[in-house]
Image: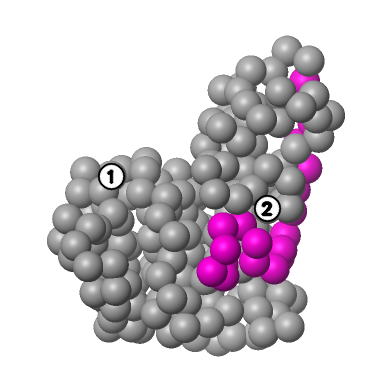
Amino acid sequence: MRKEPLKLGFMASGRGSNLQSILSACKDGTLNAVPVVVISNKRDSGALQIASANHIPGVYLSPSTHPDPNQLDKEIAGTLTEYGVELLVLAGYMKKIGPNTLKVFHNRIINIHPSLLPAYGGAGMFGIKVHEAVLAAGEPLTGATVHQVNEKYDEGRILAQTEVKVKDTDTAETLAARILEQEHQLYVKALQDIISGKIDLDA
């Protein structure tokens, strides 16, 4: 069990709803963690707005700021290191994590995916596309998965999952909304288990 709060770094591309749920858990004491930086590849992302509203450093890094992919990767890893990040949390980050960042934060990068991995994961499977594929296949169950991040999309070690029943009346949008509610809870619970030692990231 840690005594010092775990220093969390975040990378996000969109509205940042998972980011917000984790920040709220940090603020109310549910998580013994402190957010130290948010990086986004979208200058106008909701995630950076959330960071600003919560007085957390927000950094815009993208191919526009660093056209060379290797330099961008090094800048991301360097920024996270500069802020003392101990665990990198991907919260709707739509780009692949580069090899340098993967090396510097080996086994210390986690992501959440809106399906029961390994089903409906991989390149191109994100957001509403996942839910459309689940419905097209007639799946009775779907859900969300927290996993470690490696060099392949959605193939890192699974840390936690939650199931969501698919309703006959579901559209991709209604399914997405129900799963997102579960994502918020699952991500915080997985972080609690990492901090308490119940989940060993080096196992």
Q: In the image, which disc is placed on residue 177?
A: none
* Quadrant hosting residue 114: top right
Q: Which sits in the foreground, 31 or 167?
A: 167
Tag 1 residue: 45
Left or right side of 74 for 91: right
Residue 146 drawn in magenta: no
> Upstream in the sequence, badge 1 or badge 2?
1
Closer to the camera, 30 or 170? 170
Could you say which quadrant of the image residue 136 lies in?
top right
Disc 2 marks a residue whose amino acid type is: Thr
Looking at the picture, does residue 129 appear above or below residue 108? above
Residue numbers of the magenta segment: 149-167
Find residue 152 and report its horizontal and vertical position in percent.
Answer: 57, 63
Count of numbered badges drawn on the protein: 2
The image shows residue 28 at horizontal and vertical percentages of 49, 59
Q: Quadrant of the C terminus?
A: bottom right
Please identify the residue farthest to the left as the structure is shown: 65
